[in-house]
Amino acid sequence: MGLYKYLAASKGEAPHEILVEADNSSEALGKLRSRRIVPIKFCGEASMNGNGGFSWRRSKVNTYEFTRQLAPLLESFIPLEKALGIIAESATVPEQKAFVTSLRQGLHEGKKFSELVRSHGSLFPGYYANLIESGEETGCLPEVVNQLYKFMGETKELKDFIVSSSIYPAAILAVTITVTILLFTIFVPRFAKIFIDMNRPMPGSMEFLLGVSAFAFWAWWLIPLALILIWLGLKRALGEEALRFQIHQLLLRVPLLCRIIIDLEMCKYIRTLAILIANHVEIIRTVKISGRIIRNPVIRTGFEDIGRKLKGGEKLSAALSGNRFVPAEMVPMLRVGEESGTVGEMLGRIASHLENDTRLKIKHLLSLFEPAVIVFLALMVLVVVVSIFVAMMEINSINQGGSQL
């Protein structure tokens, strides 16, 4: 899913820039035509910062905090425009205040809230605008915003868990890399200098270590350069989309990592299904919107025919049955939900269970990573120590031979 920028005009209005969220330019044009907007000029894909250019500066706009403030106001039957005014008035960060004010100004100009959300590019998660649009069409905007707040909170909690759980392994990895660099760039060359000062040939083990040391000190830049050249070559040969597909396909073949990648995507997919179904969005549209949430192109292809199966008369549980990416326990539980008329509630329970299970899998993976890094460090030290020990033994034999003579 990307953002496409057009210079366009509605009937009786002056041309203005508009952002359209779509999978490709053809779909973007179709969305413009469906809104009876005439495209005049294609201005390219919108930048990631949403301001017309790439920026290293991190935006200070907090969409999670914005949603947290908006949800209770809408549930208290305060009109959207007035709710935005209250949020803007209470904002302490100038950038956040300007952001909310721009949304309010857009409402004054007669634009839909979902359209305004799309116009702010990557500030909002990819699913946000679609869910807001569904809330506008069904008249359930307060409920949708409240569920969005809960969804974003659970996603934030999961990200915080991953970050906090990765701190210790990352510290171990940093120490390992630092010690390895010091061994090969400082310690090994200084020990090798002993042989040079004695005018003696170095053992094969020391020559190998010295070669690694010289490469690490002088030619380390060849590694990132080679990786960049390989990346550019593959990108030109296969195309960006095909290369991205191949990389994700390769990641899904890694034994421990693949299930975590799949579960993270399924958490978002199932949670989106739950929100839309709970707010009575038509099932075909629900599946289409939820499919766009999936970022992994390999996993996304596994859900492309769900809409076709539903149009053929199958229930959602039957359409998802046999899908290798769907958790094994999901289909039976979903079938029970369909029989009892609690599909949305059941999907919410499945998503919560899957999120907890994913946390455990991430914790287990990181617990395996820690000893693996320690073993790697031990092997590096062992190689250096053994090589130095062999060299010292040779120095002793040289000294003993000299004393006997």
Image (cartoon, rainbow, N blue to C red):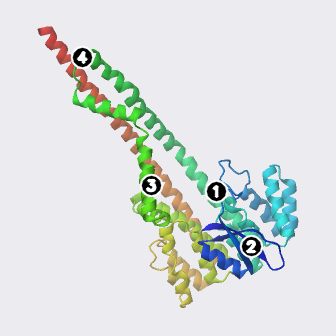
Residue at the disc numbered 2: 8
Q: CA distance from mark 2 to mark 1?
A: 36 Å
The amino acid type, in three-letter code, at marker 2 is Ala
Point out the residue furthest to the bottom here: 313
Q: CA distance from mark 3 to mark 4?
A: 45 Å
The amino acid type, in three-letter code, at marker 1 is Lys
Q: Identify the residue shown where x is 45% and y is 63%.
A: 243
Mark 3, other Cα within 10 Å: few <14 / some 14–19 / many ≥20 = some
Residue at the disc numbered 1: 156
Specify the quadrant of the image occupied by residue 28.
bottom right
- Where is residue 59 drawn, in percent x and y? 71, 51
Question: Which residue is at the front of the view, 368 or 286?
Answer: 286
Left or right: residue 22 compared with residue 40: left
Mark 1 or 3, nearer chain start: 1
Q: Identify the residue shown where x is 46% and y is 73%.
A: 328
The amino acid type, in three-letter code, at marker 4 is Asn
Left or right: residue 240 compared with residue 156: left
Marks 4 and 1 close (CB-CB < 8 Å): no
Residue at the disc numbered 3: 231
Label 1 sits on a secondary structure element that is: helix
Q: CA distance from mark 4 to mark 1?
A: 62 Å
- Where is residue 11 drawn, in percent x and y? 81, 80
Q: Nearer the viewer, mark 2 or mark 1?
A: 2
Mark 2 or 4, nearer chain start: 2
Q: Relative to 302, is 94 above or below? A: above
User: Quick check: can you spot residue 78?
Assistant: no
Q: CA distance from mark 2 to mark 3?
A: 37 Å
